[in-house]
Amino acid sequence: MAVINYQFIAQVEYGPAAGLYNPQLISQVEYGEAPEGFLIYQMLGQIETTFSLPDPPENLQADSWIGGNIITWDESLEAVYYNLYWSKTPGVTKQNGNLIQGIYDTLYFHPTSVGSGTYYYVATVMGTFEESNESNEDSASAYYSTPQGHVIW
C-alpha cells in the first residue's frame, strides 16, 4: 500500500471568484494558466489516496517458433501495459532480467539468433501507479526450419 499526495486547491488574487477554487474548477486549469481575469498565485491543501500492486499476469507460456519465441499470458484488467523480462539463465526477475517494456497485447514474438539456446521469461503488469510482481517463469528455444521439397528454377 502506498500514499500519493496531490496539491491542487488554488487561491486567486483577484476576480469575481476571488478566494479558493474547488477541485472541479482547478482541474480545468493547466500549466499554471488561469481563467481570464484571474491570477493563481498559491497552491494549498492536499488529498491522500491509497493503492495496491496489480496482480501479476497468469499462465505465462513460452513456445519455440521459427526465428524466435512466442510468449503469451492471460489478460489483466489492471494493465495499462505489460513488461516482459528475459534471461539466458533460469530464475529471471525484474532485477536481473533484460527488459522489453510497453507491450500492449498478451502475445509477444521475441526474435532470437540461430543456436542461441534457451531463453527464460517472466511478465509483469504495469498498472496506473505501480508494476506487479513477476508471473510464473517459462522457457523456450527458437528453431529455424529448412524448406521441404525441391526448388524449381
Image (tube, rainbow, N blue to C red):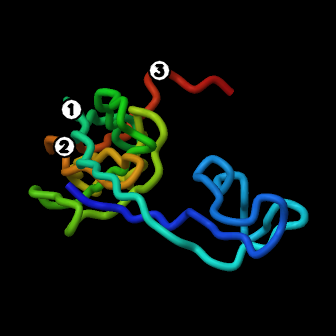
User: In the rendered view of the protein, which quadrant contains the C terminus?
Assistant: top right
Q: CA distance from mark 3 to mark 2?
A: 42 Å
The vertical placement of 31 against 23, above or below, is below
User: Residue 72: image x %, image y %?
Assistant: 32, 32
Residue 58 is tagged as: 1
141 left or right of 10? left
User: Residue 76: image x %, image y %?
Assistant: 33, 31
Which type of secondary structure does the marked residue at label 1 adopt? loop
Q: Are marks 1 and 2 in contact (CB under 8 Å)?
A: yes
Q: Viewer-nearest of labels 3 and 2? A: 2
Q: Residue furthest left?
A: 91
Question: Which residue is under mark 2?
Answer: 135
The vertical placement of 19 against 23, above or below, is below
Label 1 environment density (alpha carbons within 10 Å; few <14, some 14–19, many ≥20):
some
Question: Which residue is under mark 3?
Answer: 149
Q: Quadrant of residue 142?
A: top left
Instruction: Please name whichever residue, 122 or 9, is drawn nearer the observer in this view of the structure.
Output: 9
Give the mark count: 3
Query: What residue appears at the point 30 percent right and 54 percent down from the top-left corner?
Result: 131
Sequence-wise, which precedes: disc 1 or disc 2?
A: 1
Q: CA distance from mark 1 to mark 2?
A: 6 Å
Query: Of the residues shown, which amino acid type is indicated by label 3?
Result: Gly
10 left or right of 12? left
User: Residue 9: image x %, image y %?
Assistant: 57, 63
Query: Of the residues shown, which amino acid type is indicated by label 1?
Result: Glu
User: Residue 54: image x %, image y %?
Assistant: 27, 43
Q: Are marks 3 and 2 in contact (CB under 8 Å)?
A: no
Sequence-wise, which precedes: disc 3 or disc 2?
A: 2
Which type of secondary structure does the marked residue at label 3 adopt? loop
Sequence-wise, which precedes: disc 3 or disc 1?
A: 1
140 left or right of 104? left
Query: Of the residues shown, which amino acid type is indicated by label 2?
Result: Ser
